[in-house]
Image: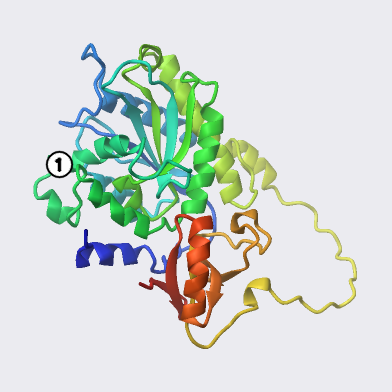
C-alpha cells in the first residue's frame, strides 16, 4: 500500500518542532481526560444489555478529574465530554491540542465476543509493539480496530482521516513509519498507571503495550489509553457497576498522575495545594561560601556541532534533556536536536548519509520504533 501525499505530510507534522508554552516553564499545568465513546456510540455493552461503556468511562473520568482538582490547585483538568454526547476521535485530540495539554488520558472499557474469561485492565501507548512475536497484526489488532472503528460513524470519514480505514489491516502500516514525539513520557506514565492500578477493583493487569490508536496519534503531548476492565467478564463487570469500583479505578489512575507530575515537574512537590504552599514559604537566606573559581565543563550534547546536515536513527523525542549514560540509549552515543519544547535524539549519527544508513540497519533491530532522519537547522525530517 502506498501512502497518500496527505497522509505522509501528516506524519511529517509530528517531526516538526513543537512551540513552547508562553510562560516558558516546565510543569504539568493542564491535563485532558477523555471518556471514550458517548451519544449514539455506546461503546461495548454488557451481555445483559444494561451497562454501556460510554457511561462507565464518563463516571471514571469525572471521578479522576475531581481527585486531581481537589489535590492540585495549579492543574487545569478538562474533559473531552462532560455528558452523554458524541465527540469524534479527531475532535477529542483537538481538545487536548488546542488547550496545550501536558497529558492526555483516554479512558475505555474492554470486551470480547468470544467468551467471558478474559479480564483485567491494560494500558496502551502509541506505536508498534517491540515485544517479540507481538506486532501490530497480532493480539491487540482487534482491540485497535474496535476503538478506531468509531470513525465509521462519521460522514466522509475517508476524507477527514486521510484515507485511514479502521477495518483494513494495511491502513495500520503507516503507524510503523512514525513515532510519538512524547513516547518516553507516555511510556513512563503508562508504567505508573499499571503499577498503581494493580490490586485495585480490577486486580489483573494485562500490562503495558504500544498500539496504533488513532486518538493517541493525533495528540501532541504524552498520551495513554487505558482499558479499565472487561465489560464481558462477570467479575470485572460487578466491580464496574459499583461506586466503590469506579472510585477505586479513578484512584489508581490518580496515584499514577501524582507520581508522573512529580517527575514531570523536575522533582517538585506533589500532594495537596496546602502542602505545596507550606513548602513554598521563603527560607532565610544563607551567606554564600567563597568557592575557588572553576571553568565550566563543556556540555556533552555540544560535542557535535556540524555546519551541514546530520543523518541518523531517531529513537526518541521528549521534553527533557537526557544524559549520555541514560539506559534508554543502550550504550549508544546520541546527537540531540534541541527544540523549543521537544528534543529529538539520534543515534548512529554521521554527516555521511551512507555511513549513517548502514548504522540504521543495525539500530532498527535494537530500537524497533526508530526511523531514519536528516537533521538540519534545528529540525528533523524523514529521509527515505
* Furthest-bottom residue in this view: 307
What is the total number of numbered labels drawn onto the structure image? 1
* Furthest-left residue in this view: 155
- Residue placed most toward the observer, 80 or 283: 80
- Quadrant in the rendering for residue 62: top left
Question: Quadrant location of the C terminus?
Answer: bottom left
Question: Is residue 77 depicted above or below 302 in this figure?
Answer: above
Q: Locate residue 107, reporting x and y percent.
A: 36, 34
Q: Residue at x 55, y 85 (%)?
A: 306
Q: Locate residue 81, reporting x and y percent.
A: 28, 37
Whether residue 24 is visible: no
Pointer 1 local density, CA inside 10 Å: few below 14, some 14–19, many at least 20: few
Q: Is residue 21 left or right of residue 347?
A: left
Question: Quadrant location of the N terminus?
Answer: bottom left
- Residue placed most toward the observer, 337 or 256: 337
- Residue placed most toward the observer, 315 or 151: 315
Q: Is residue 90 left or right of residue 66?
A: left
Whether residue 130 is visible: yes
Question: Is residue 163 depicted above or below 362 in this figure?
Answer: above
Q: Locate residue 287, reporting x and y percent.
A: 86, 63
Q: Which residue is mark 1?
A: 152
Amino acid at each position: 500500500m502506498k501512502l497518500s501525499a496527505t497522509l505522509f505530510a501528516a506524519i511529517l507534522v509530528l517531526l516538526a518542532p513543537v512551540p513552547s508554552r508562553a510562560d516558558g516553564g516546565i510543569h504539568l499545568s493542564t491535563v485532558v481526560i477523555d471518556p471514550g465513546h458517548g451519544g449514539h456510540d455506546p461503546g461495548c455493552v454488557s451481555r445483559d444489555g444494561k451497562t454501556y461503556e460510554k457511561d462507565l468511562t464518563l463516571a471514571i473520568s469525572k471521578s479522576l478529574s475531581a481527585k486531581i482538582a481537589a489535590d492540585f490547585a495549579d492543574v487545569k483538568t478538562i474533559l473531552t465530554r462532560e455528558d452523554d454526547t458524541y465527540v469524534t476521535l479527531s475532535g477529542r485530540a483537538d481538545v487536548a491540542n488546542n488547550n496545550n495539554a501536558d497529558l492526555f488520558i483516554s479512558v475505555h472499557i474492554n470486551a470480547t465476543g468470544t467468551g467471558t474469561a478474559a479480564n483485567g485492565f491494560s494500558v496502551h501507548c502509541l506505536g508498534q509493539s517491540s515485544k517479540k512475536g507481538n506486532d501490530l497484526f497480532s493480539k491487540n489488532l482487534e482491540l485497535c480496530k474496535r476503538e478506531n472503528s468509531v470513525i465509521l460513524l462519521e460522514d466522509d470519514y475517508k476524507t477527514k482521516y486521510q484515507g485511514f480505514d479502521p477495518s483494513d489491516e494495511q491502513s495500520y502500516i503507516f503507524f510503523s513509519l512514525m513515532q510519538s514525539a512524547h513516547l518516553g513520557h507516555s511510556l513512563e506514565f503508562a508504567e505508573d498507571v499499571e503499577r498503581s492500578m494493580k490490586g485495585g477493583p480490577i486486580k489483573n493487569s494485562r500490562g503495558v503495550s504500544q498500539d496504533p490508536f488513532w486518538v493517541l496519534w493525533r495528540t501532541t503531548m504524552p498520551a495513554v489509553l487505558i482499558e479499565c476492565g472487561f465489560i464481558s467478564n462477570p467479575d470485572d463487570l460487578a466491580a464496574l457497576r459499583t461506586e466503590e469500583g469506579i472510585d477505586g479505578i479513578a484512584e489508581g489512575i490518580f496515584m499514577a498522575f501524582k507520581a508522573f507530575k512529580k517527575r514531570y515537574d523536575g522533582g517538585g512537590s506533589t500532594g495537596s495545594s496546602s502542602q505545596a504552599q507550606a513548602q513554598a514559604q521563603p527560607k532565610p537566606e544563607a551567606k554564600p561560601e567563597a568557592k575557588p573559581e572553576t571553568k565550566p565543563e563543556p556540555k556533552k550534547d555540544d560535542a557535535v556541532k556540524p555546519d551541514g546536515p546530520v543523518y541518523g536513527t531517531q529513537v526518541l523525542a521528549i521534553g527533557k534533556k537526557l544524559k549520555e549514560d541514560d539506559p534508554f540509549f543502550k550504550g549508544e552515543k546520541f546527537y540531540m536536536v534541541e527544540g523549543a519544547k521537544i528534543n529529538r535524539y539520534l543515534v548512529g549519527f554521521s554527516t555521511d548519509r551512507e555511513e549513517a544508513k548502514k548504522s540504521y540497519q543495525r539500530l532498527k533491530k535494537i530500537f524497533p520504533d526508530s526511523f531514519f532522519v536528516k537533521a538540519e537547522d534545528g529540525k528533523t525530517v524523514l529521509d527515505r
